Image: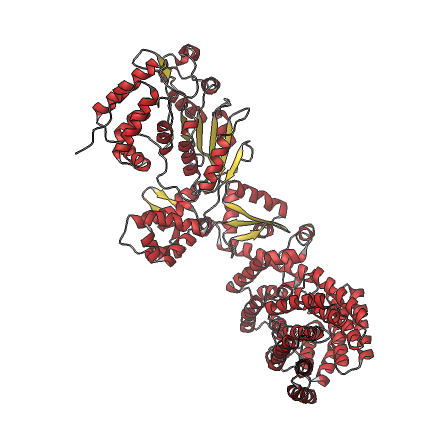
Amino acid sequence: MTTPLPRPGHARTAAEFVALLRATKTRSGLSYRTLEREARKAGDHLPVSTMANALGRGSLPRPEVVAALVRACGGDPAAVREWLAAHEVLARREGAPRTEAVARPSPESWGPLAAGGAEEDAGGDRWPLTPWLLPADPALFVGREEELDTACRMLDRPGPGPSVVLVTGPAGVGKTALAVRAGHQLAPRFPDGQLYADLRGFDAEPAEPFTVLGAFLRALGVRGGVVPSDMTDRVHLYRTLLAQRQTLIVLDNAADARQVGELLPNGARCAVVVTSRTTLADMSGHRLPLGVFDSATGLTLLREMLGTDRTAEDAGSARSIVDTCGGLPLAVWVAGARLAARPHWPLRKVARALADEQRRLDELAVGHIAVRASLDLSYQGMTPATQHALGLLALMPTADFGVWALAALLGVDLVEAEKVLDDLVEVHLVGVRAVGTTGIRYQLHDLVRVLARERASGELRRQERAEALTRLLGAALHLADRAADTLSVDFQGVSQSDLVSWRLSPGDTEQLLAAPLAWFTEERQFLIQVADQALDRSEVAPAAGLATTLTTLFQVGGHFDDWERLQKRSLKAATHVGDRRSASQLHRCLGELTTILDRYPEALDHFEQALLLAEGLGPSYRASATAGLAYVHRLLGQYEAAVRRFEEAAELARKAGNVNCLVYATTGIGVIALEHGRVPAAMERFTEGLRVSRSGGYRPGEAQALRCLGQSHRALGAYAPAAESFRLAAAISTELGDRLGATHATCWLGDILVRQGSLHEGRRMLARSLWTYREFGNIWGEAAALNALAEAQLSAGRPEHARRRAEAAVRLWQDIGARTWLATGLDTLAEAHALGGDHDAAARTREAAAAARRGAVALPSGAGPADG
């Protein structure tokens, strides 16, 4: 049997009336959220926040709230009439027909225009209508809680004028949902109502402020027949009516500030929310930009729509849906709505469909809501020139780019490209991803990219697309070549400038490359993808030139996987088309890489192939390949061949004017002398290399020569000058961004400090070097650091610690065939055994060290004892 509702006529005060109303809610057994849904079914608007506010205070709620709440609790029409009658009696008894937080002006103060636009209550008094125009509170609201709190705080902030919050962001990001939810939450804060208008700013026919003002005035109680026909009069009346009110105005989907300006009130107790796809840069207010969801929040939205069990059953497909939607809330919602309406569909069905770029936008539609239509409104609102630019941006191999990329695609300078990007950012079709050292990096949302590609395929001629991408490749090659030349890390010495088809002006180039290493680092992935795209389009020579030029970045940053993958692919393409020049250069670069990675037979093959293909190409091509081949011969202990090749490389470098290669060859000859104990001869070569490096401004060569001189001083027991040389070398390499070069110098400096008695500082440097070597995969460096740490432990009287580190160093040197350094490691290990009291093991280890020295001498890759 249904429990009868409390009888409101028993209430003698407003507080008793509210208590009976609260009892009615309790007896219904329904939650606030359920009551909200029941009210919506009955055609009422009853947000949770409104109910909580009405039932939590001692003053009378508004009659429309009472009626809606009684209906939601199960009251029939007779019960509703009874409650409203009781409300009327109490309202008269307490001296006001409406109990509101703010006193209302008298009807007479509204003037003749409002005389007929009032609501007459049972007592014959006329009072202005209270408009509640907000759409229904979104039933599903996920992932914007923090932004919602921020919006509510901003709207509730007192000031000399109305609070204005500007909610901006791309299409489908959830701006309207946030504005509507904030309006419902703040209903008690604005007892004089809420006005709402969809301005349709990007539709073919945007709402006119004149029309919106007419609708607002009628909602405020002005009868249609007396709404002013003049725009200025409408604005004046609108602002007059709101001057003393507490009203929230939501202006949704605004195109720009001009569409909004005349709809803003002047009352200090009013507040305004404006949503727009533009940045509304020329409006004042509290800004609240919205971005796309991260993966976790997108999954939460999908889970709320489909249920935890269904998404958990195929978590991989759920994540794929969110990722393919790019975290755009509208896209995730549409995908979720399609699945929710089809409970028999597995998630993988939608995930597979969305993975197909050709079908993606078609799949993201449900009912009258379509992501394509939403994005297309923004696209149609742009100028033809901006649409053209967006179509070209969609041709790029990646969504992340710098301003120079658009400049190249359009064939314009940086200033012009920045203007176009400002227009695209203004309408949130291009986002600002980050502000890096060398400027702003921009990003296209994946779904915007898909739409732009569709447009480009129909609106851009094939030749136009090809020419734009060729300009992009040319600009990438030119900038990378200039940056590599500025850094001067590599010793190849062959410019790729003759392959450049388009370049930025000298002024723009200088601006971009003010910090070449920073530019290289920020653009690395983009440049790799430009090269890959060019290979896909069979532009082999410039693509191979770009891959070759990137050697500098790969070497400095230790990006060995990128280095090998891209250059092997480029080499295959160059070999296929018979491009000997590109193939020779790529073999030389891959020889350098495989040397660093201790793959000596492979390195020999690459350098020999490079020399074979360089026949007839001039000394510049042969010099670097000859020097690289000499270096590998030295590592393998083939000293006669190494010296011959180094001398040949030095002669070729002089003819070509390649200072970098000349220093490399000169230092290499010195290292061989040092390894044979001819320290004065070695120092002469190193000093010559230092002089040539400084004269030619070759900073990496200067660091290398200083490291070699440090090793020479170390061999003579002159630890102070050795330490100074290593410090200078480390400083230069650090300045250049060459972490591996800096680590070589730091490792040897740590060894010197241990020998000088600074055990703590020396061990700290060695430990740091060890981890860096492991990060780079430099085996010889790791062994050298371990051996030096073992010697440091011996100095500290810790034989067991020394033994473990020495054994690890010995294993590594044994693996790479470095017999000279294997003997050094065995000496250290023998000392550890002796200090630990195991003299038999010490004797056996010394015998092994002597045997290693009698064999062929071989040094490790990348970092020998002097050129480390």
Q: Residue furthest front?
A: 837
Closest to the observer, 571 or 462: 571
Could you say where residue 65 lies in the image, as x and y percent from the top left?
32, 26
**Vertical side of 108 occupied by 411: above or below:** below
**Where the C terminus falls, by quadrant?**
bottom right
**Where the N terminus falls, by quadrant?**
top left
Could you say where residue 417 lies in the image, as x and y percent from the top left?
59, 46
Could you say where residue 426 lies in the image, as x and y percent from the top left?
53, 40
**Vertical side of 747 occupied by 129: above or below:** above
Closest to the observer, 135 or 205: 135
Residue located 53% across and 43% down the image? 425
Could you say where residue 484 lies in the image, as x and y percent from the top left?
67, 62
Tell whether 123 sits left or right of 102.
Answer: left
Residue located 63% across and 78% down the image? 803
**Vertical side of 272 occupied by 792: above or below:** below
Kindly indicate the quadrant of the structure image that contains residue 752: bottom right
